[in-house]
Image (cartoon, rainbow, N blue to C red):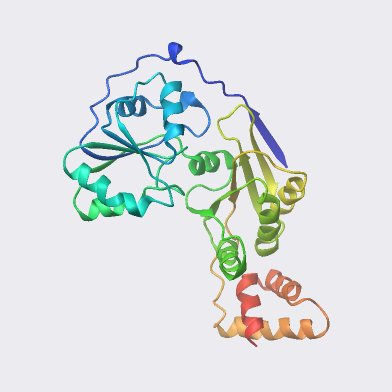
Amino acid sequence: MSNQHRSADAPSPETTPQGPPVPPLPPGITLAATPIGNLSDATFRLRSALGEADVIAAEDTRRVRALAAGLNVALRAHLISLHEHNETARLQELVDRAEAGERILVVSDAGMPTISDPGFHLVAAAASRGVGITVAPGASAPVTALALAGLPTDAFTFNGFLPRKGRDRRERLEQIAEASATQILFESPHRVAATLADLAEHCGPDRRAALARELTKLHEEVRRGTLADLAAWAEGGVRGEVVLIIGGSPHPKAADSSDSRVRSLAAEVRALADLGLRLKDAARHVAAREGVAVNALYRAATRQ
C-alpha cells in the first residue's frame, strides 16, 4: 500500500493576478463550483460571479461571505440560504427571480452544487420553465480523487454517501461489488473504517481501492491498496474529508440469480452450508472457483 502527501498553500488575495477578462454573468441561474480546500483553486469566473450576482443562493451564507472575503471580492448580492432542508421551499422564489432577469448564483460549501449538495431540484424546476441555466466549473472532490487513485477512469459511477444501515445499504454494497465501472463514494471520517470493512466483505478483500482525504489542503493524503489494506489502516482513525475509490469487478457480467447455472451452483453453496460453513463463506468459495459474482450466488442460495 502506498501513500502520497502534497502541500498546497493558497496565496494571499493581494498576490493573485487579475487574470483574463471574464464575460458578464448572464441572467438566469449559474451553478458555480467553489474550492474544496485550497482557496487558490477559485476560478476567475467564480470571483467575477460573486461580485456581479443579484442573488447568491448558498448552502451556508456565512461560508460564502468568508469565501468572498478570502478572495477580496465585495458582495452586492442578496444572500439566500439553499440547503437540503429548505430547497423545495425556495424553488418558486428563485425561479421567478431568474425568469424576471435577475442573475442567480448557486454555490455550495465546497465543490459543485447538485453533486451530493443542494441544487438539483432548483435546476429541474428552472429547466421545466425554460429558465436559462449555466455552469461556472471548477474543483470537484469526486473527479479529483478519481484522477489521483490510479484506478481505471474510462467508466465510473458516483454513489455519494451510502445508506447508513439496513436493506438499502446491503443492496447498494451489492451493486458496487458487481459493477464493472470504478466506484466513487463519499464517507465521513468516523464511519470510513466500518464502510471499508463492509466493502471488503462484499467486493472481496483483494479488490483494489484508494482513500483520498483532505484533497487540495495542506495535509492532502492518498492511500492506495486493497480494501483489506485500507480497512486495517482506517481502524487507527481517519481525519478530514474522505473520498473512496473502488476498482470495478473482475466478473461484471456474471449470470443473474435466475440463470440455471447459478441455481445449480447455489445448490452446492447450500450443501456446503449444511456441512457447517457460513453461507456467505460458502458462496464466496464457489464464486471464486467458478468466476461468478458472489452476491448473485449468495442471493440465489438464500432463496433455495
Q: Nearer the viewer, residue 95 or 248?
A: 95
Q: Quadrant of the C terminus?
A: bottom right
> How many callouts does the rendering have?
0
Decide: is 92 above or below 59.
below
In the image, is 11 to the left or to the right of 51?
right
Taking the view exactly as shown, the residue that stands out farthest to the right is 276
Q: Residue at x 39, y 14 (%)?
A: 17
Q: Quadrant of the N terminus?
A: top right
Decide: is 273 above or below 201.
below
In the image, is 248 to the left or to the right of 110?
right
Taking the view exactly as shown, the residue that stands out farthest to the left is 100
Regarding residue 182, the answer to whether it shows in the image is: yes
Regarding residue 34, the answer to whether it shows in the image is: no
User: x, y percentage for residue 24?
Assistant: 23, 27
Q: Quadrant of residue 88?
A: bottom left
User: x, y percentage for residue 148?
Assistant: 57, 38
Q: Residue at x 44, y 47 (%)?
A: 117
User: x, y percentage for residue 181?
Assistant: 52, 56
Taking the view exactly as shown, the residue that stands out farthest to the top is 14
User: x, y percentage for residue 219?
Assistant: 64, 29
Q: Quadrant of residue 176?
A: bottom right
Q: Residue at x 27, y 54 (%)?
A: 125
